[in-house]
Structures are given as C-alpha cells and as structure tokens.
Image (cartoon, helix red, strand yellow):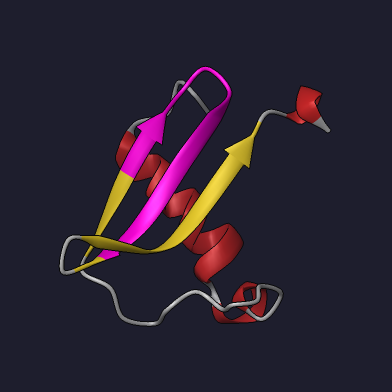
Amino acid sequence: MRQMRNSRLVCVLRSAVLSPEKSRRFRPAPPTDYDAYRVQITAEHIIVDLLTDGCAVFRCLFESAEDY
C-alpha cells in the first residue's frame, strides 16, 4: 500500500471502510458527509483522515500485516 498514489488509497478506504455494508462495523460510524481527504504516510502507518471544514472528523489507520 505504501507504493500506491493517494487517490488509490482513498479508493481502498471507500471500499473497505466507507461502503454501507462495511461502515456498520465501526463505532462511531464514519460520517456520510465530509469535504476532503488527507493522506499521511509514515514509516509505521498510512493514515487517511476525512475532513469537514478543514478539521478531521474520522481517521482510518492502516497498519502493515507484520504488526498483527
């Protein structure tokens, strides 16, 4: 995943987290309305924030499989 472009990471987020059948697993649930995404790639994680008015309203943190 670290080699993916930010737009592709957002597609993964949409399919794995934000789709209606998947979003029910999360508490609190991801918001249905937001303005933008912010993607951060660190050595340990990939972080995708959903933003509303420039503030993060939901964060999805992807960890590498070796961390499990």
For the C terminus, give its image quadrant: top right
Quarter where residue 56 is shown: bottom left
Find out whether residue 41 is within the magenta segment. yes
x and y, in percent, of residue 39 in the image:
34, 41
x 25%, y 62%: residue: 55
Q: Which residue is drawn at 56% across and 78% down?
A: 29
Q: Give the range drawn in magenta.
A: 39-51
The number of discs equals 0
**Dominant secondary structure, magenta:** strand
Q: Horizontal and vertical percent for residue 36?
A: 23, 60
Q: Residue at x 31, y 81 (%)?
A: 33
Task: Single out the residue that lies furthest toward the front.
Answer: 55
| Residue closest to the eye, 20 or 51 | 51
Along the line of sight, the residue nearer the viewer: 22 or 34: 34
Image vertical order of residue 61 relative to residue 50, above or below? above
Residue 16, picture quadrant: bottom right
- Classify 5 as above or below 12: above
Q: In the rendering, at what x and y percent does residue 35 appear?
A: 20, 69
Left or right of 48, for residue 65: right
